Image (spheres, rainbow, N blue to C red):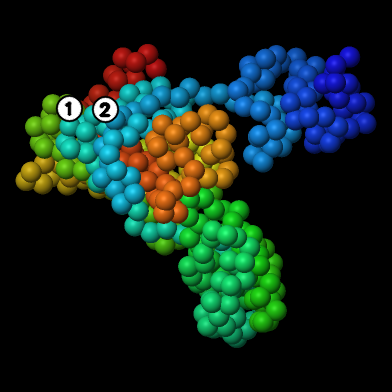
C-alpha cells in the first residue's frame, strides 16, 4: 500500500480528516490521497485534475484540501499599445476563458486601437479599503467616536503601518447609522492587491479605537469596504485602482476595421450601455467589461471574486469631428503583481508576458501598469462588441467561430 493509499484509508475509517493530511505527509502525497478518496467515493476519474505543473507545496498559501488544479484555455491579444502613467509601449495581454469568440472579439478591438495609434490609460486613484463596524450606545456616542477618529488619523496610521513594511494608511472616513459606526480605512498597498494587508493593519488600528473611545468592535469587515459585492460606494469612491483608458479612431478606420459607423456605435452605446443600464438599475454602465477583467484576472493570478468590483465600469462614446472617441473607466479594479496567486507558475508567466511580474520600481508601478493594460483591453472589448451589435454581426460572429 502506498502512502497515499494509506492516508485515504485512514480518512475513510474516520481516523483522519481531509484537512489533516499535510500533518502526516508531504503536500503532493496528501493531494494524491484526496483524489484517490474522491475517486473511490464518487466514481470520478480525477486524472486530469491531478495533472498539474507546479509543486503542491507551493500552492499551500492559496488553497486548502488540495486535490489538484483546474485548467483553463488561455489565449492572447495584442500587441496592444498603451500610453500610461506606468504602462508604456506594446503589450500582449493573456486571457484565460472558456467563452468562445471572446479573445477573437477583444483582439479585433486591439487591432483597431493599434491602427489608431494606441490607447491612453491612467490610474486616477489607488487605495484598498477595509471598513470595520463598531457598536456604540447612541448617536451621541457615534458622533464622539467619529470626531475622535477624524482628529487621530495619524495615531491610527502609526498602529496600522506597524503591521506591514509596505502599506500606508491614506485616510479613515467615519460613517454613522444609528448606533453603528463604520470606519472606512484606505491604504496604499503598492504592488500588492493588499486585501490581507489592509485587514491585518485595520485590526491593529481598531484596538486603538476601542481603547480610546466608547466604540466596541463587532466585525472587522462591516461591508462598507465593499469587497466582492456590487456597491455604489466603490463606484463613487473607488477601491483598489480607479483606472481609465481612451482612444480616438478615425471615421474611416471605424468603417474599415469594425464594419460600422461612428454614429451607429455612439447610438448603441447610449441606448444600451447608458439608458439600458440606468433602466436596469445597474452599477456597471458597460457592454461586457467583466469579460476582459475576468479573463485577465485568471491569467495573471488575481482574486477572481473581485471581478464583481472590476465590472463597475462606465463606457462612453462620442462622435467627434476627427473620429470616434471611446473611453472606459473602471472605478474599482483590484489588482496586484505580488502576493496571492501571482506567484503560481502559470499566472507568473502571464505577468511575465506583460512584463509586470513582481514588485515595481518605484513600488506600486507594476500594479499600476497592470491596471492600465487591463483597462485598455477592456476598452478594446467594448469597442468590438458595440461594433458587432451596431452592425448586427454578434450572432454571426459566434456562428462563424462554431460557438
Viewer-nearest residue: 373 or 330: 373
Residue at image point 48% right, 47% down: 359
Residue situated in front as seen by the camera: 321 or 20: 20
> Residue under circle 1?
257
x then y, percent, for residue 336? 49, 46
- Relative to residue 342, is residue 233 drawn left or right? left
Q: Residue furthest left?
A: 321
The residue pinned by badge 2 equals: 108
Identify which residue is drawn at 45% across, 54% down: 363
- Name the spot of residue 300 as percent of width and height, x first: 48, 36
Q: Earlier in the sequence, mark 2 or mark 1?
A: 2
Rendered residue at 58%/60% (across/down): 165
Regarding mark 1 in the picture, which secondary structure is present there?
helix
Task: Report the quarter where the C terminus lies.
Answer: top left
Crowdedness near tag 1: few (<14), some (14–19) or many (≥20) residues, C-alpha within 10 Å: some
Q: CA distance from mark 2 to mark 1?
A: 8 Å
Amino acid at each position: 500500500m502506498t502512502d497515499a493509499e494509506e492516508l485515504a484509508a485512514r480518512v475513510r475509517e474516520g481516523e483522519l480528516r481531509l484537512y489533516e493530511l499535510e500533518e502526516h505527509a508531504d503536500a503532493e502525497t496528501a493531494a494524491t490521497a484526496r483524489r484517490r478518496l474522491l475517486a473511490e467515493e464518487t466514481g470520478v476519474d480525477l486524472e486530469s485534475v491531478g495533472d498539474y505543473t507546479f509543486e503542491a507545496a507551493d500552492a499551500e498559501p492559496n488553497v486548502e484540501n488540495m486535490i489538484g488544479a483546474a485548467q483553463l484555455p488561455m489565449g492572447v491579444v495584442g500587441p496592444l499599445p498603451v500610453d500610461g502613467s506606468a504602462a508604456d509601449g506594446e503589450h500582449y495581454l493573456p486571457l484565460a476563458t472558456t467563452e468562445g469568440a471572446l479573445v477573437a472579439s477583444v483582439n479585433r478591438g486591439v487591432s483597431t486601437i493599434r491602427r489608431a495609434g494606441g490607447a491612453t490609460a491612467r490610474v486616477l486613484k489607488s487605495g484598498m479599503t477595509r471598513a470595520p463596524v463598531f457598536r456604540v450606545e447612541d448617536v451621541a456616542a457615534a458622533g464622539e467616536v467619529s470626531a475622535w477618529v477624524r482628529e487621530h488619523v495619524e495615531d491610527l496610521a502609526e498602529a496600522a503601518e506597524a503591521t506591514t513594511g509596505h502599506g500606508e494608511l491614506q485616510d479613515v472616513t467615519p460613517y454613522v447609522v444609528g448606533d453603528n459606526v463604520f470606519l472606512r480605512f484606505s491604504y496604499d498597498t503598492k504592488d500588492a492587491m493588499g486585501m490581507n494587508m489592509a485587514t491585518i493593519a485595520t485590526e491593529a488600528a481598531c484596538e486603538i479605537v476601542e481603547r480610546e473611545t466608547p466604540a466596541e468592535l463587532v466585525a472587522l469587515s462591516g461591508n462598507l469596504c465593499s469587497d466582492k459585492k456590487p456597491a455604489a460606494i466603490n463606484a463613487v469612491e473607488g477601491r483598489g485602482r480607479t483606472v481609465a483608458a481612451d482612444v480616438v479612431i478615425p471615421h474611416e478606420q471605424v468603417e474599415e476595421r469594425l464594419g460600422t459607423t461612428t454614429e451607429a456605435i455612439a447610438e448603441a452605446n447610449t441606448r444600451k450601455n447608458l439608458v439600458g443600464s440606468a433602466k436596469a438599475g445597474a452599477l456597471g454602465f458597460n457592454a461586457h467589461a467583466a469579460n476582459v477583467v475576468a479573463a485577465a484576472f485568471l491569467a495573471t493570478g488575481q482574486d477572481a471574486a473581485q471581478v464583481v468590483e472590476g465590472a463597475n465600469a462606465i463606457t462612453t462614446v462620442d462622435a467627434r469631428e476627427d473620429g470616434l472617441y471611446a473611453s472606459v473607466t473602471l472605478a474599482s479594479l483590484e489588482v496586484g503583481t505580488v502576493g496571492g496567486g501571482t506567484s503560481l507558475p502559470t499566472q507568473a508567466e502571464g505577468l511575465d508576458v506583460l512584463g509586470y511580474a513582481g514588485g515595481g520600481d518605484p513600488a506600486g508601478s507594476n500594479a499600476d501598469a497592470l491596471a492600465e493594460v487591463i483597462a485598455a483591453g477592456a476598452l478594446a472589448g467594448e469597442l468590438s462588441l458595440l461594433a458587432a451589435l451596431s452592425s448586427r454581426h454578434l450572432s454571426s460572429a459566434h456562428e462563424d467561430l462554431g460557438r
